[in-house]
Amino acid sequence: MKATKIAKYSSLYFTLALIISLVILYFTYPAFQDAINELWKVLKSGDQDKISSTIQGFGAWGVVAIILIIILQMFLVVFPSWLPMIAAALVYGTFSSILISSTGVFLASTIGYSLGLGVSENALHKFISDKTFDKLNYWVSHYGFWSIVLFRVSPFLSNDAISVLAGGLKMNYIKFITATMIGIVPLATAIAFFASDIETLKTGLYWIGGAGILFYGIFVFIDHRKRKG
């Protein structure tokens, strides 16, 4: 029984160990702290040229820096989620940036899910009512997969709260991460191809997000009526 429990929460233990290691590294290794502070400052400025040049300055560690940015952004939403993806496209090109962005979101989503997995049902009930909990369970059971796809494909909805929620409600991990990748790969691809034309990209992302919400709303409405019929 004990071995089963350890196996079940191994991803959570790994996530916590990774976070603790990064925190220790930040406070004990000045070069790492300076690099993170510089990168954070440049990202908050939103200046694409500065972001690209800063990442290029990291050399071979630039890929790691972008992935770390994506992970941090999904938990500390202080700049648009698509900004590090644009930086990846400008620095590394179309196909490499798709792989880098997808990897970053994969890791961030897994970390969020793992943290949610460590939250017990009793703990969830302390923050939400039984009625709300039942509704969330119903939603995850029936619409969780496509809800996650929608949140990933639309950068204006995407945040890792949905990853924590999926973990907290014990959604199947394979189902969760599959939905995540189905949503994020098209988004990363669109960003990679149009990164050089920000205005066109923004317009396209608004259209993608709006169309996704519309079609998803229609689907849920029709399906919900069928279930009640």
Image (tube, rainbow, N blue to C red):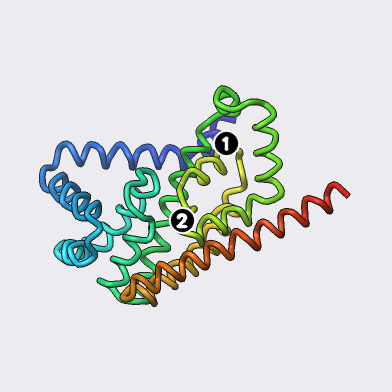
Residue 105 quadrant:
bottom left
Disc 1 crowd, CA 10 A, few/some/many (<14, 14-19, 20+):
few
Q: Position of residue 86 (x, y in %)?
A: 33, 67
Q: Position of residue 139 (x, y in %)?
A: 68, 44
175 relative to 105 in the view: left or right: right
Amino acid type, residue under disc 1 in the picture:
Thr
Amino acid type, residue under disc 2 in the picture:
Phe
Between residue 45 and residue 191, name the one nearer to us: 45
How far apart are labels 1 and 2 at the CA level? 38 Å
Between residue 14 and residue 136, name the one nearer to us: 136
Residue in view at x 71 percent, y 49 percent: 142
Label placed on residue 4: 1
Q: In the image, is residue 41 above or below residue 7? A: below
Label 1, secondary structure: give it. Answer: helix
31 relative to 104 in the view: left or right: left
Q: Position of residue 5 (x, y in %)?
A: 55, 33
Between residue 172 and residue 155, name the one nearer to us: 155
Residue in view at x 40 percent, y 67 percent: 202
Q: Give the labeled residue for mark 2.
A: 156
Mark toward the start of the polypeptide (1 vs 2): 1
Label 2, secondary structure: give it. Answer: loop
The quadrant of the image that shows the N terminus is top right
72 relative to 123 in the view: left or right: left
Residue in view at x 65 percent, y 32 percent: 133
